[in-house]
Each structure stands twice: as C-alpha cells, then as structure tokens.
Amino acid sequence: MCWGGSKLIFSIGWTEPLADWDSGFTVLFDDAPDPDELGPDPTKHPGIRLVHLGCLLEDHPEIGVGLDIARKHRVVDLDDAGRWVAGDVSRPEIETGLSSADP
C-alpha cells in the first residue's frame, strides 16, 4: 500500500502479510496523508493506493535496500544523508497493520 504518490519515498513499514497477494509493505511518500485524515477505512482515502510491488520497484529502484531493512526491523526511514535507517514502529500506519498488495 502506498500513502501519497510524489517522487520522494521517506519511510517503509512492514507487517505480516494479510494474504498471499499481500507483500506486507506500506510505503510513505512525502505527500502522504496525515493518519488523522483517513477515517474508518483508510483504503478509501484518495491519497492511499495499492501498487504491485514489482511496479513500485521498477518506478523506484532506490527503495530496494529500504524494503529489505523494513522487513527485518518493521519500519525504515530515509535519514537526512539519504540512508535507510531503522525507524519508529509506534507510528499509526505501522500500528494499524495496513499493508500493500502484490508481493
């Protein structure tokens, strides 16, 4: 699942996949909606969309390492130097277990 859609990805979360079609990843772009804006069903928000993981990697190959770290540590953030570092697992989008489609 992708939150936002601009060019810059700043955070990636991972939770156990919901089904065979689910990769477990949640990707946050710099224009991601605020969690308070989502309402009861976040998947209905226009700023949140399901994206095939292969297509996401094709469009953003720079996130490959971030995906690997997120799977190990549950969340990874891009630091000011442009490096992926383990992040804060208490953020709402991680706690809700929202995840992406298509492994």
Image (cartoon, grey):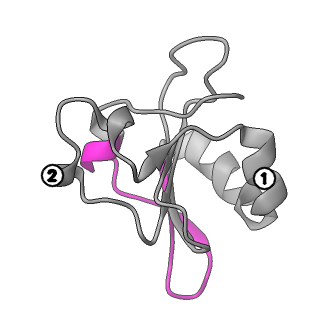
- Label drawn at residue 36: 2
Q: Is residue 23 above or below residue 38?
A: above
Q: What stretch is highlighted in magenta?
A: 75-93
- Please tell me in which quadrant of the rendered image residue 95 appears: top left
Q: What element carries label 1?
A: helix
**Residue assigned mark 1:** 57
Q: Residue at x 27, y 50 (%)?
A: 91
| Residue in front for this viewpoint, 46 or 48 | 46
Q: Does residue 91 belong to the magenta stretch? A: yes
Q: How far apart are marks 2 and 1 (CA)?
A: 28 Å
x, y (%) of residue 34? Answer: 25, 59
Q: What element carries label 2?
A: helix
Q: Do the residues labelled 2 and 1 touch (CB within 8 Å)?
A: no
Q: Does residue 87 belong to the magenta stretch? A: yes
**Circle 1 Cα neighbour tier, 10 Å, few/some/many (<14 / 14–19 / ≥20):** few
Say which quadrant the C terminus sits in. Answer: top right
Looking at numbered disc 2 in the image, what kind of residue is underneath it? Asp
Q: In this view, does 15 lie to the left or right of 101?
A: left
Q: Is residue 22 above or below residue 43?
A: above
Q: Residue at x 69, y 28 (%)?
A: 102
Q: Earlier in the sequence, mark 2 or mark 1?
A: 2
x, y (%) of residue 3? Answer: 45, 53
- Please tell me in which quadrant of the rendered image residue 5 appears: bottom right
Q: Residue at x 76, y 67 (%)?
A: 62
Q: Is residue 90 visible?
A: no
Q: Is residue 69 left or right of residue 61?
A: left
Q: Is residue 57 visible?
A: yes
